[in-house]
Each structure stands twice: as C-alpha cells, then as structure tokens.
Amino acid sequence: MQPRISAICKRQVARVFRRNIHVNCVEDLEGGTSKYQAALFIDNVFPLKIARVDVRPYLMQRSMAAKQSRVEAMLPADLPHKARVSKIDPQMRDGGGLVHFTVAADSSESARQAARDVVQAVNEHVQQHCQRWWTQVRALGVRGEPFCEDIVRMLPAKRVRVEFCGPALDTEQLFKEFRPFGRIVDIEVGSSSAIVRFARLRGATSARACVHGDVVGATRLRVSYAGEDHEHLVMQWLKEHSKFTVPLAAAALIAAIYAVFDPIREFCVENKITHRFDLARIPLIGDVRRVAMRSLLRREPARHDDMSAWTGLADQGARLESILDDPPESFIVVVGPHGSGKARVVEQATRGKKYRIEIDAHALAAGHSELEQMTQLAHQLGWWPVFNSIISITSAIDVMATAATGSSAGISATPESQVRRILETLALVLANIRHERKQAHLHSASHASAPVHALPPEDVPVIVFDSLLDADIKFAPVILDWATSIVEAGLAHCIITATSISGYHEVQRAQPQNAASLISLNDASPMEAVTLLQKQLVPSLDPTNQEASESVNESIAHAATVLGGRLEDLQLFVQKVRAGESGAAALESIVQRAITEVRKYAFSDDSEVGQCEHTWTPEQFWFLLTELAQRSEIEYDRIRSSALFAGKDDALLGLAEAQLITMVYNHDRPARIRPGRPVYAAAFERILQDPGFACSMTVKMNKKFVDLETAKIRAAEDELALLNVFRASADAHAALTSGMAVIAASQAGYRHGSSSWSRSDPFNPEAFIAQAANTSARNASGSSDSLAPAHKPHQSWTAWLKSFFVSSPSAAAPHDKSETAAYSCSSLVPGIPFELQGRVQFLLRSIHASQQKIDRWDAQSQEMSRRLASL
C-alpha cells in the first residue's frame, strides 16, 4: 500500500512542480541579492468542516499555538536554499495550513526555482514521516494570493466558482490550471465565470487555497466555493417520480404518526376506563379536592334519591342487574319516555362495575359537523392526542397525488375513518383488560390449574350508549355495528337507552341472530308518586308542626295527580319545594313551563323542533289537544284515519319524536296515544281554556276541515260529471240538481203533509214537484229505454218524489252494484240507469253530508270570531 501511495503522490507532485509559484520581493540584500517571499499549502492536516454543526474541528486543539505546531510538524528541520519560515496560518475549515517562507535569490526566476525546491523537500518529508494509510498529506505551491477568511456560510464544497477579472478562459486553460489538484468531474464555462466540479472535496479546498489570485495571461482568477443545490435536486427528483414518491411519503408520515401516538392513545383510553392514574381516586387527594370544591362552590353533598318506593324502577333495575351478572351475549335495550328514570336505573345497576364506559349521544349531537362529533367522541373515551389537522393534510396529499398521477392514492382520512380508529382502540383496550383480569383471576384462584372460562360479573366492562338512536349522530350506524361485534365477541355488555320501541327494533335488526333484552320503563302510578314525594319532602319538616305537615301532604297529593309518575317532573317539584317555594307555586311554575314548551314546539312555524323534523301542522296538533284534554288517552287508529291525518302517520310519529305525545304499543304496534308527559294533560286543559288562543286555533282548524270537505265535494261533482248519466242537455242538468235538492230537503226536516220547511232557506215543494214532473215528461221517451221493465211504473219524477217522502230518509244508499237489486223501487232516482243508481245516490248523499259539515263548521267559526271580537 505504501509504495502505491508514494507513486501516486510523486506523479501529482510532479504536475504541481511544473507550475510557477508566486514569489514577491520583500527586501533587497547586499551582494545584488534580494529576499523573496512565497507560500505553500499543506493539505490534509485537519478534518474538513462539511457542515455548520460539524464538531470535529472543535475536538482538535483550540489554541492557535497548538494548531501552528501541528502544521510545523509537517516541515523538515532544514529547508533547501536556507529558506526560513516566516508565518504559519492554519486553515481549520479547509483542512490544512498555509506556510509562508522566504528565500534569498538574485532574480525572481531563481526565487521561483528555489520555492519549487522547498515544496519538493516538504513533500518528500511528509511522504516519509507523515503519511498514513487512511490519509494522504501533500504540499502544494501557492500561485496566487490566498484569501484567508472565516465566513460561516462559505463551507467547503466540491464545486468552485472561478471569476474572470479580464478575458474569459476556455475549458482547456481551466483544465490545465486546476487538474493538478485532483480529478475534475465537469467544467461549466460562462462569459464572466466558470464552475469547476472536483471528484473529491480535498481537491476543491487545495485549488481554492493555491489558485485564488493567480494570473493566467491577462486574466486574474478569483476562486470561491459554490455549494451544491441539494434541495433543488431532491425536489426535481421527487417531481420526476411523483407517482410513487408522494403516496409513499404520505403513507410513511401517517404510519410514523400512528406508530408513535397509537400506544399513547391506548394508554389514555385504558386510564379513562380503569382510572389507574386518576389523582381523584387516591383517597386523601380525592377527598381533599372534593371538600375544597364543595366549599368553594358552597354546595352541600349530593343526595341520592331513594327509589325503593318506585316499584317499577326497582323491579326493572333488579332485572337489569341480573342480566349484567350473566356473560354478554346480546344487547340490552332500556326503553322509556324522556324523564322516566332510564339513566337512574342504568346508573344504579352498573354502580358496582369496575369498568364502566358511557357515550352520551346528546353531547355528540351538539356538534354541528362530523369533525366536531368525532372530537367529542374521542374526548368521552379519553382518546388523546387528537389531530384534526391530519384529515385535512391527508386530503390535501390525496388531491396532490390525484393531480400529479391522475388517480387517487386512497390515503385521505375522513371523520368516519377516525371514528373507526377510535372504536378499534377501545376494542383493543377491552381485549387487554379481559386478558389481564383473566390472568389475575387465575393467580388468585385456589386451583390455578383449573381453566377460567368467564370473568366475575364485576370485572366485565359495561358500555352505556345514552340515547344513541334518538340523537342526530351522523356515524351512529358505525357505532352500532362496532357494538354488535363487541357483544358477539363477549368483551363487554352494551346497554342502549331509547325513548320508543322503534329503538329496540333497530337494535334487533343490527343483531338478528340474538334477541336483545328489553327493559321497558313507564311512569309510576299515582300512589307510588305520592310515596316518593312524601319520602323526599316530609322528613325535612318539623314533626311538631301539624298544620305544615297537612299542607304539604295536600300539595303532594295534588302534585302527584297533576305531574303523574314522571320522575323528571317529580324531582323538579322536590327541588323547588326544598328551595323554599310553596307546593302550589312550584306546581304552577312546572305547569306554566309545560304550557310554554307545548306552544313553542307544537305551534311554532319553525321547520325543525330540536333534533326532529317538524312534520305536523298546528291544526293537526290542536285536534289532538282537544281530544286529549277530554280523555287521558285516545285510540291511535281513530286519530290516524281522521280527516286531518288522512290515514298517514308521519305527523303522529313526528309528534312522538318531539315528545309532545306518547305512543302506547300493543303487540309491537301503536294502539293508543297519551300526552308526552303527564303534566302535559294539565297544560292542554290550560291552553284549551285560553279564550283568545282557543278561538283562533278553532277557526284555523275549521277552515282546514272546510277545505278538506270542499275538496271532497269537488271530487264527487267531477265524478258525477264523468259518469254522464244524463243526456248532455240543460234539462238533464236540471233533473240532477232537482234530485240533489230533494235529498237536501228531505234530510233537512221536511214533514209530510205540511207546507213548511225547517231549513232557513225558503223552499216551495209544489213548484219543485211541478218542475220535476215537467222534466220527467220531456225525457220520458229517452228515460224509459234505459230502465228495466220492472221499474217502468216509477219513471216519472212525481211518483219518485212521493215514494221518496214516504220512505225513510235515513236509509243509506248501497255502494256496490251487486246490492242495487235489494233496493226498493221507491228509492230509485228517475232518469238514472239502473247500474249507476247506487253510485249516484252515494255521491249525492256524500255531497249533502259534506255540505252539512261545512255549514256546522262555518257556524262554529262565526261564533268563535264573535267571541274574539268581544275580547
């Protein structure tokens, strides 16, 4: 290795020796000689500084004397031509040092030759004494005037910029000037400068130290470092290969983020469930904190209401506890109206569970967008940190990839995908908890070798989905599907609360293979409500004050009658009484609030009520209100088939969703309708007693009824016109009109043998009969052909009128053609074909019945208008 290095060095040094070395006369001596100054550059003495944070140069000697000594060690003891070293300038950044020396010569040419001999002697010395196999030290003669500076930004680079102070040099001249310092990769020549790129960094540093200030012909050279444009090259390469670099970079970024933060999120979710690192669970710290907050807010300790008197809640709570004691197999659905105690039953049944998770759907629905709902879900489950910006970043990357490659990369994240990741993390935590508890149970069991197939009931996690199917959550199906997989895997019990039986059906559709456990809560009975209020209010009274006790008992009985068994209203009544209000005042405020709620939600013109769509009209609800104010419950089918609802249940379902009414189901179908809350019955009565509002709403409802009946009349008239039972003439129309008038007259109260009518409008029966007889006589020839032989004696209108008044006016006309034969001849309308008799009479009677209803509603509306005017 050493002979090979020496041979290479000799060839390089030979090329350098042939170059002229810059000498400068500094002093004239005696005898015709002068003192000349020259310089040489010793390379590879110090490590090169290749970056601003490169600490290798700082690990060398820091003092100037030490650096100069290191460079001086490369020089031989005796230099040829009695040359003397005048100055040593270490160049730490360039990895070498400049040695300035002087020689005595009679001419500048002799001085240059002497300087070359000095450089050769230094090279021979370093080759023999300073060479190492991993490094190559060399001495180079300086042709120019070195520029010694310590600018931080000018770091060594393989590319050097050569500026021409004079005529530009060509490539051949530059090659001869810079090739002795190392192999050249490329030379780029411009009009005023050139870029020379070396293969090694040491060649560039040596060239800058030795060539700067050199004069070639009439051109002076200025040499500086030209750093590589690494950023430009990288970006150019990425742009050229964007089809796979952009997706790979995005995938790597997302994978790195998930790899770093997923363990943190699992830890946070597990701590949210187990409370292992919750300071509030530490006895001393938690107690002190609770006492401090209570004293700060001046609150009394929270009271837990005694629900033992509530037979329905107590029984359903015990049933729920027994279900939770079994291994999880299916969903548990707790159904009950709003304020019926669903949350209380679930809370008491799960109070002894170690791991309880609650997802409040109403808090999720408060978010206006999917991103806000996803963030709220992460907060409830303790999933942290949450990077909402990752969704926009991945979407932007996917758009960039689509624009660059023409196809989507498929890496964009959405709120739904983030929800799935949150739920997957929760499932992983539940599986870890199950594994840990099984291991702990195995170690604590007396027979460790016996396998444990099920966990103790208190160790099975419970997930409560509060009103998941009632709130407007955009990713509720995702949560329900995930909960189905959790239940089927047996990782946790899943309890879902709902306000109607439809929630139970939806859960059953999500898990059709197993029947969900249904727990139905209803309002308590009046006796249970009285017992509950007595337990809450009577103990706080002075037992010696008999009058106060009797007054409270009377207010309790009256409140239980009005408020019913709705837990929410009873608790509000108790709070108001405890706050110092009287029983009557507390009850009145609750009823007034219910009246305000009904008027706000039922009769408002807003398109939406809360989270449910406003699918009903004020007239429809007023009709229901008048019915429910008279009876505690009404038949669902009767209301649904009424004229205002027209056999459709959209309005009724919307009212039930808005909790203005309650559906009572029988065999999984609605059977009866009740007020949404028991207190609403009193509110309905109060609203009905308001004369101004009641009159105005009655007028509106009657107008709606009149419009519906008018539509029926128009439809019947259109059908009669389409039947075309008479000849197309004015006489035929007059006959049809006469027939309708006879029916109207007979049902309006005409008494046979009397010349007076009970209708308010004057009516002359003799003139009417004469007109009918003339019409019948004119159409006798045409009408007789259309009637059956058995009916020919009754062709005339006169005979028909006489038989009509003799017959019962209340007899109903048949609807079906097959029943027309059973009709007596006296009920047939003359001039009408036999096969159309039933339909024509039905339409005539329907028109008359509708007109009677319209008259009645018009009269009622006029009466209500007079009342409004008198207010």
Image: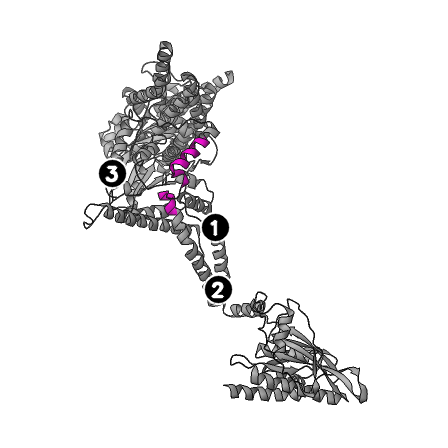
Image location (x, y in percent) of residue 40: 67, 81
Judged from the image, the secondary structure of the residue bearing numbered disc 3 is: helix
> What secondary structure do most residues of the magenta stretch adopt?
helix
Q: Which residue is mark 1?
A: 388
Write down the residue under mark 3.
323
The image position of residue 180, as x and y in percent, is 62, 85
- Residue 200 visible within the image: yes
| Residue at figure coordinates x 51%, y 86% from the top left | 2
Seen from the viewer's position, the closer of residues 450 and 246 is 450
Q: How many marks?
A: 3
Of the two numbered discs 3 and 2 on the same chain, state the one appearing first in sequence: 2
Cβ atoms at labels 3 and 1 below 8 Å apart: no
Magenta span includes 670: no
Q: Range of the magenta residues? A: 269-293
- Give left or right: position of 858 versus 48: left
Asked if disc 3 and disc 2 are in contact, CB closer than 8 Å, the reply is no
Q: Against 462, is 5 above or below?
A: below
Residue positioned 21% across, 45% down in the render? 445
283 is within the stretch colored magenta: yes
Q: Are marks 1 and 2 in contact (CB under 8 Å)?
A: no
Q: Return the disc, 1 or 2, that comes first in the chain's sequence.
A: 2
Binning the other alpha carbons within 10 Å of mark 3 as few (below 14), some (14 to 19) or many (20 upward) gives some
Q: Residues within 10 Å of mark 1 (few under 14, many from 20)?
A: some
Q: Which amino acid, mark 2?
A: Val
Mark 3 residue type? Ile
Please give the label number shown on residue 788: none
Closer to the N terminus: mark 3 or mark 1? 3
Give the residue at x 68% y 70%.
Answer: 149
Q: Which mark is residue 246?
A: 2
Separation (CA) of disc 3 from disc 1: 39 Å
Residue 11 horizontal side relative to residue 458, left or right = right
Secondary structure of the residue carrying tag 2 is helix
